[in-house]
Amino acid sequence: MISQHLSSSFTSITCNFIGIDSSMKELFTFYSNFKDNGCMIGICGMGGSGKTTLARVFYEKFHSYFEGSSFIANVREYSEKFDLLQLQQLLLANILEEKDADIRNVYHGVNMIKKRLCQKKVLIVLDDVNKLDQLENLAGEHGWFGLGSLIIITTRDKHLLDHHGVHKIYKPNPLNSDDTLKLFCLKAFKKEQPNEGYMQLSQDVVCYANGYPLALITFGSFLLGRTMDTWKSALDIFKKFPKKEIFDTLKVSYDGLEDMWKEIFLDVACFFRGKMKDQVIEILETCGFDAKIGIQVLMDKSLLTIENDTLQMHDLLQEMGKEIVRQESREEPGKRSRLWLRKDLFHVLMNKTASKTIQAIVLDRPGGDEAYQHIESYSEVFSKMCNLRLLIIDNVHILKGLNHLSNKLRLLDWHGYSSKCLPSRFQSKELVELKLQFSKIEYLWRGVKYLDKLKLINLGHSLNLIRTPDFTGFPRLETLCLRGCINLVEIDRSIGGLSKLTVLNLEFCRSLTNLPSSMDGLRKLGENQMLEGTDLTGTAIQEVPSSISFLICRGCEKEIFKSTLDSVHHEFENSAVVKATKIMGTYDDSNMAEHSASWSFPGETERDLDSLAVA
């Protein structure tokens, strides 16, 4: 029986292929469950991960147990140069052992394959498939072939396998630490262990390769016979100058993407690897991308994974993405589409080399070299970044203020922004989110600005903020966070016209003595309005909108606190929208108990409430 022959062959099959034994057994086990009917197995993974090697080893050792077999390599590349008809001819010629099959066209070829092979038990490998029509015209379904047939498809695109309805999608097992070192050493030293004195250097390279077979082979081959000095600088060399074999192999997947998916991939590779998926989706959607679909596409193409709700990719895929951006201008960062290093941004600012090419700047890791935290007089360079759509900066201070920002900005997030206001000429009608937390801003701007797409303003912990802007020009504003703005004394009365406002955070606004009477107009919003955190120390809220679901008072004086609590109780005593109140301040426990005894609390915890805040 074939199963007995296959089972007894594993040791001899895999002895020359590091770490492939377990994968071979898994493929065989799955096939054995379907061998009486026939099946299709897809092997999926990033380029260079061992898909073709696994399929080739399986084919070379087991093809003789089938009545006919064909291994068609590089289907993607072959299809770009030739017609699928020629691949059909090759398939039939290999299996039937006939030199030239008389096929008039692709449709005729499909009928020929079904007619000539429907009674044969065949083993077919279609390697590096990238389009559905390749499968539809070479192996449309397992019923084309005889009972016991096995069709193996290798591809980088999981969605293609899903669409074709294969029985099993298999991802090659990553090499374990012992196998990765062994594979690397076989290339670097022609033996399974490093030479004396090279163990740590070898382990460093193996760690960087992160189990990626092509990298282990390429790095090992490059370092064979090199000096100790070359070995010591190997990682820097590989990071600064990615090996062409690896870069070209990985870039095939990138080149096959649509333009929007390419932009999403580069943003993730340069800025967002390791970030929470939902947070990144929100940012990318703010930039106008179809992020949910795009991320799924990148996952299907083996360019991205989700681990613990964070976006992850192999180190070498990330390096490939960054290298694509660096190749836009090898010598001048100001002519690249993305900047993610402080030294590159400061180079652009100090040398005034900014250009319209720059789309996104993300420097979101605090700390770093003190020299890269203060900009003296180069802020005018931002005026050349006319296509900047995304600006996320943490702890970079422009001492003399900005005089220009791109009017194509969709998201502005500058933690610790050091100027007292935004540039007067800033009028980005594309702006969706404005975040200036822990800034030194005193006011956003003078007069009215019309930002029709603006949905979120977060000025939290901006200690110098005195007043809010006129809200007339933000009809779509949904979230306003002024938490910790301890010197805020005035909220513009136009806030009453924000019909879409759903979150208002005034927590620890100690100097705020009154709320505009126009806020009563927020009653019309329904039951999803939230006024979160108010520290009114001068006068009480005269009227609490019935639409407000949460009221958090922290640090209120006794009489004001009592008046406010009574007001809230009166408004909500018969309302089902009250889910909880969290009241902290100078009011003693007995008085609090007196006023809260008749309230209903459905069990929300402090964490539930805090999660509603915009920190």
Image (spheres, rainbow, N blue to C red):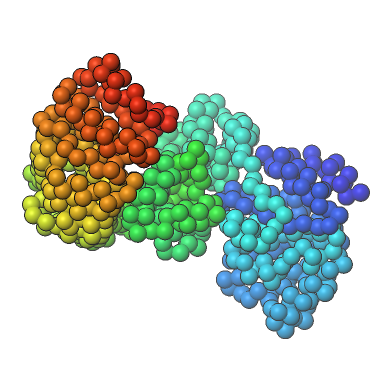
Q: Position of residue 373 (x, y in %)?
A: 19, 37
**In the displayed structure, does residue 563 sit left or right of residue 319?**
left
Q: Nearer the viewer, residue 195 or 117?
A: 117
Residue at 81% from the left image edge and 52% from the top image edge:
34
Find the residue positioned furthest to the bottom. 104
Q: Is residue 429 in view?
A: yes
Find the residue positioned furthest to the right. 1
Residue at 74% from the left image edge and 47% from the top image edge:
27
Q: Nearer the viewer, residue 538 or 13?
A: 538
Q: Position of residue 596 (x, y in %)?
A: 32, 25
Q: Quadrant of the C terminus?
A: top left
Residue at 52% from the left image edge and 33% from the top image edge:
202
Q: Quadrant of residue 491?
A: top left
Q: Is residue 336 in view?
A: no
Q: Nearer the viewer, residue 167 or 247?
A: 167
Q: Position of residue 273 (x, y in %)?
A: 42, 43
Q: Position of residue 71 (x, y in %)?
A: 73, 61
Residue at 47% from the left image edge and 57% from the top image edge:
293
| Image: 567 above or below 500 | above
**In the displayed structure, does residue 601 sit left or right of residue 110?**
left
Numbered-mark total:
0
